[in-house]
Amino acid sequence: MDTGTLNAVTWTIPNALCLIGSRSGEEWNGMTQSWVTQVSMEPVMIAIAVDRKAVTNRLIRGGGAFSVNLWDRTDTRIFRSFSKPATRDGSTLNGRPVREGITGVPIFDEAVAWLECRLVQTVEFVTHDLFLGEVVDAGFREGGRDVPVARMEDTRMKYGGVRRGGH
Amino acid sequence: MDTGTLNAVTWTIPNALCLIGSRSGEEWNGMTQSWVTQVSMEPVMIAIAVDRKAVTNRLIRGGGAFSVNLWDRTDTRIFRSFSKPATRDGSTLNGRPVREGITGVPIFDEAVAWLECRLVQTVEFVTHDLFLGEVVDAGFREGGRDVPVARMEDTRMKYGGVRRGGH
């Protein structure tokens, strides 16, 4: 199994492209994310796997919650800006308006659809942690039900495969 | 949070539509699957969550391995037939040719791309188990690199949300 093939195969797995909201105390963040899926119906659980070096990893551990913000497929430029730690200014992250969910995590007002999750369990790997969150709230923005959401394939971004320099 | 909204939101999460290969002794199966994502780069780990009542759940637990078979987007009729336990006849499942991987699990010859995983860890929920598998082999079929793979949105199928009758 050569690394190039393994990378290419993992890149073919269809995934979302969305924003994860996280918060620990007064530190808030939004982060571009692709590894996300539901994993259980009872309870309704969502799994996301987050780089151990990411600010979001530390905030999810600290705050015990995260939000999954699915985004309009026609507005994918946002994902580049949220690939670095976001700048908070009041109730905005990188200038995008957010509100606080039940758990206190930021939820993006512009998200087409969103899920708020309370962290239930963490599975640790070398490069990433798998966060398993129970859904405590979910909804669409007005008119959001009819808006196709962003997918990794909508951009030239790739994420996955083996560990590289910065992974 | 009403159930109808929660179901609709979870259905918007982009996921693959693929086949899971599993085997315990002489019992083999192939099953339609949508909840699949990579979750770690070191080791390269794939997560799938499988209904606890499914034959595939028992076979993965028994055999300690599974394959993820990504499929040609233009051939989605196969997913209906693999929503029930598959019929094995020699080296075929529901008439589709399979071969044995390193771990012994069936891998579909027609899969555009495939990953073979050794089960490392299981996280149990009420309705589903989350199987975490380390990738031991992966590849494309000849010409497979250029073939778009199937996604849930390519069909009228939906999977997710809250527990229902048969979940």
Image: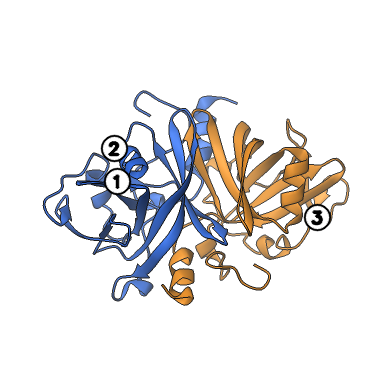
Chain colours: A blue, B orange
Q: Are marks 2 and 1 on the same chain?
A: yes
User: In this view of the protein, which residue sits in the foreground, A120 or B23?
Assistant: A120
Q: Earlier in the sequence, mark 2 or mark 1?
A: 1
> How far across and how far down the image is residue B67, in percent?
67, 42
Q: Which residue is mark 3?
A: B95
Q: Are marks 2 and 1 in contact (CB under 8 Å)?
A: yes
Q: CA distance from mark 1 to mark 3?
A: 44 Å
How packed mark 1 is, by other alpha carbons closer than 10 Å (few <14, some 14-19, many 20 or more), is many
Q: Secondary structure at mark 3?
A: loop
Q: Quadrant of residue B157?
A: bottom right
- Secondary structure under tag 2 reads helix
Give the residue type at disc 3.
Gly
Is B31 situated left or right of A145 in this image? Answer: right
Instruction: Mark yes or no: residue A67 visible.
Output: yes
Q: Is residue B50 left or right of residue B152?
A: right
Q: Tell me how far mark 2 sits from mark 1, CA to CA.
A: 9 Å
Q: Residue at x 25, y 45 (%)?
A: A82
Which mark is in front, 2 or 3?
A: 2
- Chain where mark 2 sits: A
Residue identifier under label 2 = A55
State which quarter of the image contains the N terminus of chain A.
top right
The C terminus of chain A sits in image quarter: top left
Disc 1 target residue? A31
Amino acid type at circle 2 is: Val
Disc 1 is placed on an element classified as strand
Distance from disc 2 to disc 3, alpha carbons, whole Å, reads 49 Å
